[in-house]
Amino acid sequence: MSTHDLPHMSSLSSTDALRISGYFIAIYLIYAVLSAIYNAYFGPLSKFPGPLSRKLSRLPELYTLYHGDEASELVRSHSKAIYGFRKHGQASLQKDPQFYGKSFNNVDGIITANDANHSRQRKLLSHTFADKTLKDLEPLLKSWVEKMRKKVDILKYYNCTTFDIMGDLSFSEGLDMLENSEYSSWVKTIFLGIKIDSRIRACKMINWFTEWFVNNFIMNNAKVSSAWSQMRMVVLTCRSATRSVCKYTSITTTQYKESIAGLQRTPDRPDLWTKILEKSKGPDGLSIKEHHSNASTFMVAGTETTATALSGVTYHLLRNPEYLQKLTQAIRGSHSSSEDITMESLQHLKYLHAVLQEGLRMYPPVPSMLPRRVPKGGAIVCDEFLPKGTSIGVHHLSTYRSEDNVKDPYKFAPERWLGDEKYKDDHLDSLEPFSVGPRNCIGKNLAWHEMRLILATTLFNFDLKLCEESKKWTDQKVYTLWEKIPLMVTLAPAAR
């Protein structure tokens, strides 16, 4: 039987090499075209409405994601459309690992854990956000909020306040950013890392090759991996002798041991982590690395988003003076001093709650979608069957600004939350800024108390006026979260 040896690469002429390359390119283009047609007309999400260009290709989506225009583009073009692709589509059910990625130490915290580990961790962590625990910590919350009374730059100081609060609530040590009127270096790194993470994720989403290339040749590069760990990881070391809580750096053996010692401390007073440690005893308790993963999550998810919500509602109040005046009167009329402002007293202010609800609708802290992936066996979504691996999601900003859900979606109208007849047909249950289901935001309760306390204390003590340069403050890019610009406000002592 005769055999034929394949030609060695070195024996190929340049013409042959070009011809073979052309064959591969042609095959790939044919595959890409056929895949696009399948996805647009026969794929699992083809029955959902959406622009044909986005059903055929991910390039329009990735372009807007990279440039921070995806949120505004969805609002303008198709607020109620659902689109996406199998495996690389858009969110339902379990958190999508492609979107959320790995934690800095490759150990899943509450956001990325599978169902079994998520239930275990949530059960342990939930005690710390219960009303009883937060009530015990109210003096601590108020002490940080009171420090805002002498400050001016509203966006910066909302951020400084929420980071200081979370540092003190979680680890009995403040970050002193509010005291120093400046972001710490690692907080600046967090803000930068969010944008970089969004762009890297967009590059990975182009196709299987770019995902493989980024994961294996960029993220696994020693220098890049080290730098990325520094951007994404918060190592929390808590000692009574130091005021430094958070460091952005890669884990070393020494730091790991220090972190263990820090978590086994006995603070001068209880904090949120004290309750978590109490519940973590036994075989089902959190491991040290799970403590680290969740601590990192708390210091980002429990800070920036709350400050964003406060900034958004403040902006809309200043753009609508009649609502600002009504809310200010409600707060000052029901409290004789800052000391009278408590979590309990503010829970009875229905107008304050309505204003915050409307602020969350107009300027959701997370304007994009947070993907979830359909598990084994598939699922029925909007009366359509979606197979395993399909990743879909609810886009917050376009949902909240859809005329299908609310009347006058671009109008700031707190009265829609108070039963106003004009808005009786609004689907107010469409507002879910903290997400829904067993994987919704575990810190929702704390966030509400913080927002009420900070906003009420600010309006009780100051008269606010929006500066001219911030009249179009909400014209912002979105890289998963808003890329916020300074919110310039003049503050004057409250006129009594």
Image (cartoon, rainbow, N blue to C red):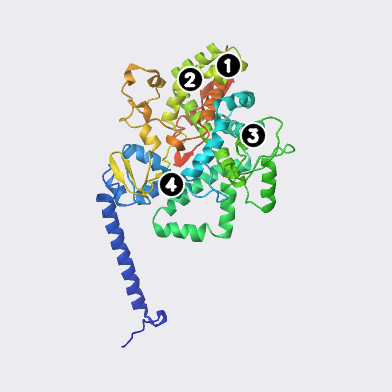
Q: Quadrant of residue 153?
A: top right
Q: Marks 2 and 3: CB-CB under 8 Å?
A: no
Q: Amino acid at mark 1?
A: Ala
Q: Give the residue displayed 26% in from the left and 54% down from the top.
A: 37
Residue sitting at the far right:
241
Q: Secondary structure at mark 3?
A: helix
Depth order, front residue of 105/314: 105
For the N terminus, the quadrant is bottom left
Q: Amino acid at mark 2?
A: Leu
Q: Earlier in the sequence, mark 4 or mark 3?
A: 4
Give the residue number, with chain letter if any, for mark 1: 494
Residue mark closest to the camera, 4 vs 2: 4
Q: Amino acid at mark 3?
A: Thr
For the C terminus, the quadrant is top right
Q: Is 168 located above or below residue 283 in the figure?
A: above
Query: How far apart, in angstroms, are the residues tagged by discs 4 and 2?
Result: 35 Å
Q: Which mark is residue 234?
A: none
Q: Give the residue displayed 58% in from the left and 58% down from the top.
A: 223
Query: How far apart, in angstroms, are the residues tagged by discs 1 and 3?
Result: 38 Å
Q: Which mark is residue 352?
A: 2
Q: Earlier in the sequence, mark 1 or mark 2?
A: 2
Classify 10 Å Cα crowding around label 3: few (below 14), some (14-19), many (20 and above).
many
Residue mark closest to the camera, 1 vs 4: 4
Tally of marks: 4
Give the residue number, with chain letter if any, for mark 4: 96
Classify 10 Å Cα crowding around label 4: few (below 14), some (14-19), many (20 and above).
many
Q: Secondary structure at mark 2?
A: helix
Give the residue number, with chain letter if any, for mark 3: 274
Depth order, front residue of 487/60: 60
Residue 155 left/right relative to 23: right
Residue sitting at the far front:
283
